[in-house]
Image: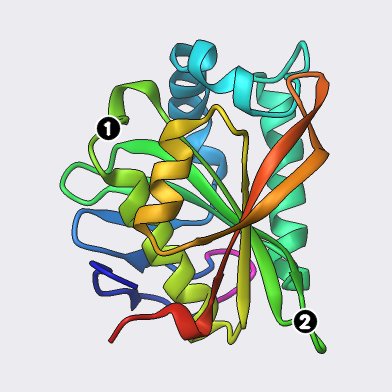
Amino acid sequence: MKGIGMVFLRSAPSYDQGPVLESERLYLRLPQSVDYETWSSLRQISAEKLRPYEPEWADNELSKDAFRLRLRFYQREFRDRTGYPFFIFLRDDHRLIGGITLSNVRRGVTQSGSIGYWIGVTYQNMGYMTEAVQTLVKYGIKDLGLHRIDAASLPDNAASIRVLEVCGFQKEGLARKFLRINGQWQDHFLYSFIEDDFVS
């Protein structure tokens, strides 16, 4: 993968803490209850940009109760090794800037997972998401032993497509009515990154 930074596994995986992944400017760790206020604030100010590209928000989307349910789901996924959800932080001042998840992890003959991400509006166009995707992809393939990581993007989401292409994902085609986004089934471009795509 071109331009990928170093990835450090700072702590051994456990149910409570999980791995902490570091890159040049960022670190990724599992969401925690103490993140609620900053997460809610960042999602609120970014709502206009995020909602067109995400599943339809519930009326209580940013409530503390909804966040608790989200955390339980994240913890269950991590415990079962079917998902690896991370919040993204700046290393210099520990600001929360977004989230990234490796989900739907499948083993057996597949050895694959799917990546999804979001970033706060004030942190867009700074290369942070590219760095976060590179970090998580390397973790997924090098540390978790996955063979393939999939991603999907709405055709009009130029920023997301640019991130995937810079990170070395290959476009595989168009999936009709692939995901229900903002209340409607919508077409998506499908991308993939496989272990052979790493550039030494």
Q: Dividing the image into 4 quarters, which one contains the C terminus?
A: bottom left
| Magenta run includes residue 95 | no
Residue at point 74% right, 15% down? 60
| Disc assigned to residue 37 | none
At a point 23% along the width and 37% down the height, the residue shown is 126
**For this view, does 11 lie left or right of residue 25?**
right
Name the one closer to the observer, 128 or 178. 178
Residue located 41% across and 76% down the image: 11
* 3 sits left or right of 194 in the view: left
Label 1 environment density (alpha carbons within 10 Å; few <14, some 14–19, many ≥20): few
Q: Main secondary structure of the magenta part?
A: loop
Instruction: Name the secondary structure under disc 1.
Output: loop
Q: Callout 2: few (<14), some (14-19), or many (20+) C-alpha neighbours within 10 Å?
A: few
Q: Position of residue 157 (x, y in %)?
A: 52, 30
Q: Earlier in the sequence, mark 1 or mark 2?
A: 2
Residue 5, image x, y percentages: 24, 69
Whether 111 is drawn above or below 168: the answer is: below
On-image quarter of the N terminus: bottom left
Real-space Cα distance between discs 1 and 2?
A: 34 Å
Location of residue 73 with respect to 155 vertically, above or below: below
Relative to 169, 33 lies left or right: right
The residue under label 2 is which amino acid type? Thr
| Label 2: which secondary element | loop
Name the residue at 69% across, 40% down: 188
Side of 58 relative to 90 (left or right): right
Magenta-colored stretch includes residue 15: yes
The residue that disc 2 covers is: 110
Q: Position of residue 169 (x, y in %)?
A: 48, 62
Provide the residue span drawn in magenta.
13-17
Residue marked by disc 1: 125
Q: Residue furthest left?
A: 92
187 is higher (above) or lower (below) than 146: above
